Image (spheres, rainbow, N blue to C red):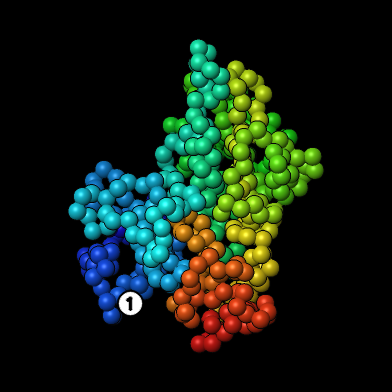
Amino acid sequence: MRIIDKNAALVRTLTPAEVQLLSAFASEQLNGPQLLQANQWLMRVRSANQWLACDCRSDVLPVLNVSLNGHTGTLFLKNNPGTAEHAPGCPFSKVEREAGASASQTPPAAWLAPDTPLRLIGDFRSAASAGGPSRSAAHEQPQLLSLLLTWIETSGLNLYATHLKQDLTQQFAALRSVAGRYPLLERVPASNYLETRLDMKHMMMLKARLREATVFGNHRRHGLLLDCVEQIKGRKVFSARSSEGFDFQGHHLYWGGSRTSGPLLALGLYSPATAGSHFYELIHIASVPVLSRAQLFPVYRDEEREPLKALVSLIDWMAGKGGKVQMRRPVIGGQVMDELVLTSDQDRVLSVSLLEQPLGPEPDAETFKRYADFKSLETFRKYVAGFFMRER
């Protein structure tokens, strides 16, 4: 068993004692001090934005993430969707579920492993067949949203800390760097056919590169357009640089299954719609709401924006007073996407929800708070500040 980062790079190998502790945790054999020790260890892995890779197989590493049940406040190990199954007899082979979660519930998107061809869009059928792509849009849409969420998580955009703050150029540079690990097809990095601005100029630049490309062979040529846009309405994407908007002919898939106002981080699939055509257009669009055009931190619902901005401001204030607090939102693999986890360098952890209405039963614990239960934004800010600063 080993700890890896979101790029699948090795952080370190676990000691035999750590493996024994986690095996007993996965088998629900721990209680008392040992259970507390395991939870503290797993929380450190989770707070560092890291995953666990099981070496029960020699050909491929099954990957697990440390998830937090927002209803009960307990930690559990969960196999990452889309990754390899464990070897028979492995103590981590069982996929753990949150208490009270139904078997029909599925994560909104799956983490996509790096260095594996994405194949976001199907090839055109032969002339003897009916026109149109051979692959259904029902598969392409989730794959595109999964890719966007994977890039957000891997590039660290779902983590906010004052000492890690980046400007917009640096945030997009991190996304482009991550894109280099994700090939559209075999040996075709997505970063080679990615434009991080949605306007006519950059669409024409991408079109020219795609038309001249030979790496696609007989496969359908396609690229990606990534930008922070104002809104997506109907079949149009509106950016700050185009009031008329850009049409897309496919589908819009949005995070959390509900439309949210902009700004939005949008990822568009760019390709000819029919075989033999030299006319390139946006096919499908996936989008995730973000805090602002300058800060691409994911937002789950519109009602979160005001208290979330207050939390960002509070984290910056605490940093000025010597308190290092970071805020992380899991965007892949969790069942409760409104969860925000705040951790400090003093090993204090606070889980908060900014939604007005609960998504289900909630734990009666000091480590979980809901913004709607406070009388005002100011009392909420004072509570969070006291939680992290009272021991300093």
Residue 155: image location, x then y, percent: 52, 53
Residue 75 visible at all: yes
Q: Nearer the viewer, residue 263 or 13?
A: 263
Circle 1 Cα neighbour tier, 10 Å, few/some/many (<14 / 14–19 / ≥20): few
Q: Nearer the viewer, residue 151 or 123?
A: 123
The residue tagged 1 is 36
Q: Which quadrant would the N terminus be assigned to in this image?
A: bottom left
Residue 74: image location, x then y, percent: 39, 71
Q: Where 349 sits versus 79, above or below?
A: below
Residue 300: image location, x then y, percent: 59, 59
Q: Residue at left 34%, top 59%?
A: 96
Q: Residue at left 53%, top 17%?
A: 130
Q: Nearer the viewer, residue 138 or 238?
A: 138
Residue 317: image location, x then y, percent: 64, 77
Counting the numbered discs, the total is: 1
Q: Where 220 sits versus 14, above or below?
A: above
| Left or right of 216 on screen, residue 241 | right
Most extreme residue toward the top is: 128
Q: Where 274 sits versus 260, above or below?
A: above
Most extreme residue toward the bottom is: 391
Residue 4 visible at all: no
Q: Residue at left 52%, top 22%?
A: 124
Most extreme residue toward the right is: 243
Q: Nearer the viewer, residue 213 or 103?
A: 103
| Left or right of 256 on screen, residue 39 | left
Q: Where 36 sits versus 239, above or below?
A: below
Q: Residue at left 69%, top 30%?
A: 204
Element assignment for label 1: helix
Three-letter code for the amino acid on which mark 1 is drawn: Leu
